[in-house]
Amino acid sequence: MTPLAGYLLVAALLFAIGLAGALTRRNAILVLIGIELMLNAANLNLIAFWRYGPHPEALTGMMFAIFSIAVAAAEAAVGLGLVIAIHRHAHTTDLDQMNRMKG
Amino acid sequence: MSFAFYLVSALTVAGALAAVLLKNTVHCALALTVAFAGLALLFLQLDAQFAGFAQILVYIGAVAILVVFAILLTRGSETPKDGGIFSRTWLAGLAVAAAVFAMLGWAVLQSEPGLPRATPAPTVTVGEIGVALMGRYVLPLEIVALLLTAALIGAVIVAMHEKEGTK
């Protein structure tokens, strides 16, 4: 197995674990954790392709991963803020009970 | 493939599995930190030192702490009395995730003969990354700065206490 294929398989496994967590957990925070895992798997793909690509000195994949990390940090802040706001309003973080958009 | 790669991969995958499977949400957050650390080690193995340390700073230093704060602020509602920690449609979600992994794994293994073999490690200094950020990528950098400011203000406003009577 080439090294690149190994990293891509690990990233695919992490993505699938994150997707399974986001689709099956009932707690909203755990769903956000699953989304973070999926974003990290994508970052691993970007870095692996940068490392084994034809022009690593162009830094394209590395820059993409760095900007992706920054956007993921913004996403986490807003997402967790929303969860806290919903918890204060509805006193639950159970997604099965969050079935109304109007409070 | 080196022994270190398998070790770090196993650590990362185990951390990710524990993060989505454990019952106690605080344990989930700690397992998530392990997965983030494993990913940072994978980045370092890929000679991406800057991305690896940015991963440690941003994810372990900020996102994991944020998750723990959110869990502690919403304490008391995380263990539902009825049913378990998984939703009623967990089987469908698991099937979708398994199908996605099968598809991705099949694609990787099919294209494996065409993938590049071991290439010499690129030597990228932090100075070069800084020059690239201030030169070719200056517009995305400014947009990210704007996005982070907007996200900071937005998160504070969303999570801020509503005053009584002004709802």
Image: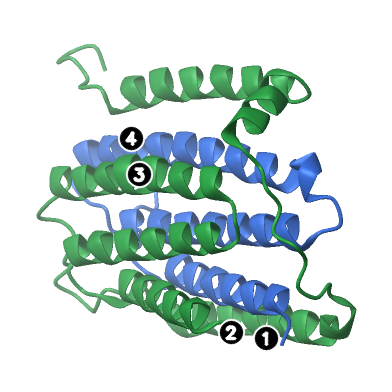
Chain colours: A blue, B green
Quarter of the rendering occupied by the N terminus of chain A: bottom right
Tell me which label, 1 or 3, sits earlier in the chain.
3
- The quarter of the picture where residue B17 lies is bottom left
The type of residue carrying mark 4 is Gly
The type of residue carrying mark 1 is Ala
Question: Residue B45, percent across and down?
Answer: 54, 63
Circle 3 residue:
B63
Residue B98's label in the rendered image is: 2
For the residues bearing labels 2 and 3, Cβ distance under 8 angstroms? no
For the residues bearing labels 1 and 2, Cβ distance under 8 angstroms? yes
SS assignment at label 2? helix
C-alpha gap between disc 1 and disc 2: 6 Å
Given residues A84 and B22, the one toward you in this image is B22
C-alpha gap between disc 4 and disc 2: 31 Å
Residue A2 lies, with reference to residue A22, above or below; the image says below
Give the letter of the chain under mark 3: B
State the count of labels: 4
Question: Residue A77, percent across and down?
Answer: 38, 35
Circle 4 residue:
A81
- Residue at 71% x, 19% y is B138
Residue B46's label in the rendered image is: none
Given residues B161 and B111, the one toward you in this image is B111
